[in-house]
Image (cartoon, grey):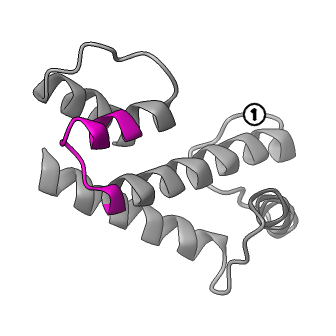
């Protein structure tokens, strides 16, 4: 959703430079007037969490997965590593954080597309 949304907003607002990282494109969307700073910050935060989880799950289970590992040990290791890397705690658990992040991202997406 985040990648599609940034590409859509850049095209919609006539920004010809679509290169750079997702973070670059998010903030370029703000500069073009296509995205509010608060939405860009939320999407930037979401992308960082989702990408970090994706990489850690791949390291923990040895392959890409669509969601958190099924086993308790692998899930706990994933949550601990993500927490350490992002310097964040997940008081209600990483799964709850992911669900809320995906819901917040979808609300922004639906409002802007």
Q: Residue at x 60, y 70 (%)?
A: 95
- Residue 3 vertical position relative to residue 74 in the rendered view, above or below: above
Q: Nearer the viewer, residue 17 or 75?
A: 17
Q: Residue at x 40, y 31 (%)?
A: 25
- Residue 65 vertical position relative to residue 89 in the rendered view, above or below: above
- Residue 79 vertical position relative to residue 96 in the rendered view, above or below: above
Considering the image in quadrants, where does the N terminus appear? top left
Considering the image in quadrants, where does the C terminus appear? top left
Residue 85 on image: x %, y %: 81, 56
- Counting the numbered discs, the total is 1
State the image quarter where residue 55 is shown: top right
Residue 68 on image: x %, y %: 66, 57
Category of crowding for the residue at label 1, using alpha-carbon neighbours closer than 10 angstroms: few (below 14), some (14–19), many (at least 20): few
Quick check: 107 left or right of 90? left
Q: What residue span does the magenta drawing correspond to?
A: 27-38
Residue 15 on image: x %, y %: 22, 21
Does the magenta run of residues contain 4? no
Quick check: 41 left or right of 107? right
Does the magenta run of residues contain 34? yes
Quick check: 53 left or right of 30? right
Residue at the far bottom in the pictured view? 91
Residue 100 on image: x %, y %: 44, 71
Quick check: 99 left or right of 80? left
Q: Residue at x 88, y 66 (%)?
A: 73
Q: Residue at x 64, y 41 (%)?
A: 65
For disc 1, the marked residue is: 63
Q: Secondary structure at mark 1?
A: loop
């Amino acid at each position: 959703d985040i990648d599609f949304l940034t590409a859509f907003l850049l095209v919609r607002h006539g920004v010809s430079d679509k290169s750079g990282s997702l973070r670059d494109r998010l903030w370029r969307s703000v500069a073009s007037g296509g995205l509010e700073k608060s939405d860009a910050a939320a999407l930037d935060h979401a992308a960082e969490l989702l990408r970090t989880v994706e990489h850690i799950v791949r390291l923990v289970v040895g392959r890409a997965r669509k969601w958190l590992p099924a086993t308790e040990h692998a899930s706990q290791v994933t949550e601990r590593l993500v927490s350490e890397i992002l310097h964040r705690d997940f008081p209600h658990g990483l799964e709850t954080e992911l669900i809320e992040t995906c819901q917040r991202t979808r609300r922004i997406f639906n409002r802007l597309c």
